[in-house]
Each structure stands twice: as structure tokens, then as C-alpha cells.
Amino acid sequence: MAKRKRRVVLTAVLLGTVLLLLIGGVAFVTFSQEGEPAMPEIPGITVEDVNVNGCVDCHNNDIADSDYRLSTSLGELVEEGKHPDVSAMVTTVPDDCVMCHSQQMAEGMGTEPLGPMMHKIHLVGGAENHFIAGYQGQCTHCHGFKEETGEFSIKSGEEG
Ligand code: HEC
Ligand code: HEC
Ligand code: HEC
């Protein structure tokens, strides 16, 4: 009886040790995989800002067969009856959009202010949103940051 009991205890101790080693191993692998967090890539802050003109630097037709120009997407909305034709009055984006999409004007025009509208389009939807997946959802793609003064601005430019 006593011998048998000792064997059971020994087996339990051995199993316990194996289990601990396993847990330790998994914890070690998980821990070492985490390592240092990657440096955030923030345009104009930690990496070079390649889209200094904001909207129009991304919404262009530089790549063959891909027309991301805002004049094109707004043109499609005009055809669907979802946007007034603004082709004659918009040259600088987003400055010229704000004549209708400002905090003051938007409600009366039956639309939204540009800031919240653009934030919803670009910053909602997690990994499904190409602005988040492809551009890390960084504010400074659209907002300029001045290191010397600490001020933010809205980048703008003419559609090419
Ligand atoms: C760094 C690149 C980048 C910048 C800068 C940028 N966008 Fe976008 N934009 C995108 C991407 C990517 C999408 C597609 C998002 C998605 O997956 O729904 C998008 C979507 C849009 C859409 C929805 C319709 C469409 O054309 O796809 C509008 C409208 C739009 N952007 C306007 C603007 C305006 C106005 C600005 C400037 C205030 C701006 N964007 C700045 C990358 C950019
Ligand atoms: C002349 C005024 C005016 C200007 C300029 C203007 N918009 Fe609009 N926009 C509107 C109005 C009005 C609506 C709402 C239309 C509706 O719901 O029928 C709208 C709606 C939108 C919508 C939502 C469309 C949808 O799918 O429901 C987007 C996106 C938009 N505007 C982007 C822009 C951008 C980007 C610019 C500048 C390049 C711009 N707008 C310039 C008046 C304007
Ligand atoms: C796709 C372009 C885009 C991105 C990305 C973006 N913004 Fe904006 N933001 C705008 C535009 C356009 C305006 C309105 C400009 C105007 O009305 O003159 C604006 C306005 C604002 C305002 C003023 C209040 C308002 O909503 O109009 C704040 C605050 C702001 N943004 C914060 C942020 C922060 C924080 C981020 C990042 C998490 C961010 N924005 C990312 C385009 C963008």
C-alpha cells in the first residue's frame, strides 16, 4: 500500500514538473516574441512626410488604371444625384470644399462639416478601412504639424 502511494505521489510530481516546464516554455516564447514595440510611423513626426499637400497627394491618378481623384468620385456622386456639381468652383482641396462643408454652412446646405465627415470615412472600420490598413490611420496625412510652434493645420493643395 505505502509503496503504491509513493509511486502515485512521484508520478504526480513528475507530471506537475512537465506541466510547469510546458507553461514556462509557452510563456517564454510568447514573451520573447513580443520584444520591443515597433516605432510608430507618424508622417512629419517620426518619418518623412511624403504627402505634404494632403488629400490630393493620395487622391490622384498617378497609378495606371486607378483613378482616386476627388473630382472623379464627386463626379460619380453628381451622376447619382448625391452631390451638387462643384467642378467649376473647386480647385484647392479641402479649402474649397469648406465653403459648403464648414461648421456654419453645412447644416443649412443639408450636409455635414468636412472634418467629422472625413474622420468617419478614414478612421472608422478598423482593418477593413484602407486608410487604416494602408496608411496607419495617421492624422498627419491630412493635418500638418509644426515642430517649432506645436501647431496643427489642415494641409491643402490643387488637384493635379
Ligand atoms: C494618405 C492618403 C489619404 C489622404 C491624405 C486622404 N485620403 Fe481620402 N481616402 C484614402 C483611402 C485609402 C480611402 C479609402 C478608405 C476606405 O477603405 O473606405 C479614402 C477615401 C476617401 C473618400 C471616400 C470616397 C473615395 O474617393 O474613396 C473621400 C470622399 C475622401 N477620401 C476624401 C478625402 C479628403 C477630402 C482628404 C483631405 C482632407 C483626404 N481624403 C485625404 C486615402 C487618403
Ligand atoms: C457647393 C457646395 C459644396 C461644395 C463646394 C462641396 N460640397 Fe460636398 N456636399 C454638398 C451637399 C449639399 C451635400 C449633400 C448632398 C445630398 O445629400 O444630396 C454634400 C455631400 C458630400 C458628401 C457625402 C456624399 C454622400 O455619399 O452622401 C461628400 C463625401 C462630400 N460632399 C465631399 C465633398 C468634398 C471632398 C468636397 C471638395 C472637394 C465637397 N464635398 C465640396 C455641398 C458641397
Ligand atoms: C483624411 C483626412 C483627415 C485625417 C486622417 C484626420 N483629419 Fe482631422 N480634419 C480633417 C479636415 C478636412 C478637417 C476640417 C477642416 C476645416 O473645416 O477647415 C479636420 C478637422 C479636425 C479638427 C477640428 C474639429 C473638426 O472636427 O472639424 C480636429 C480636432 C481634428 N481634425 C483632429 C484630428 C485627429 C486627432 C486626427 C487623427 C486621429 C485627425 N483629425 C485625422 C481631415 C482629417
Image: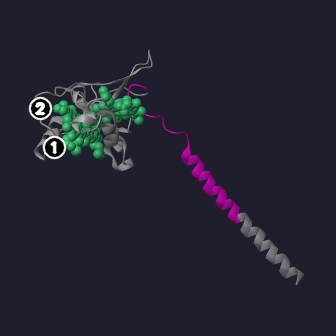
x then y, percent, for residue 137: 38, 38
The label shown at residue 141 is none
Figure check: 147 above or below 114: above
Determine the quadrant in which ligand 2 lies: top left
Q: Secondary structure at mark 2?
A: loop
Task: Say if residue 15 shows up in the picture.
Answer: yes
- As for residue 75 lying within the magenta part, the answer is no
Label 2 to label 1: alpha-carbon separation: 12 Å
Query: Circle 2 is placed at which residue position?
Result: 87
Q: Secondary structure at mark 1?
A: helix
Figure check: 34 above or below 102: below
Using residue 127 as the reference point, say whether residue 73 is left or right of it: left
Contact (CB < 8 A) between labels 2 and 1?
no
Q: Quadrant of the C terminus?
A: top left
x then y, percent, for residue 59: 22, 35
Residue 81, located in which quarter of the rendered image?
top left
Question: Residue at horizontal 16%, vertical 39%?
Answer: 74
- Nearest the eye: 66 or 6: 66
Question: Mark 1 near ligand 2 (CB under 8 Å)?
Answer: yes
Query: Circle 1 is placed at which residue position?
Result: 77
Q: Which residues are magenta?
A: 18-45
Question: Residue at horizontal 25%, vertical 39%?
Answer: 111
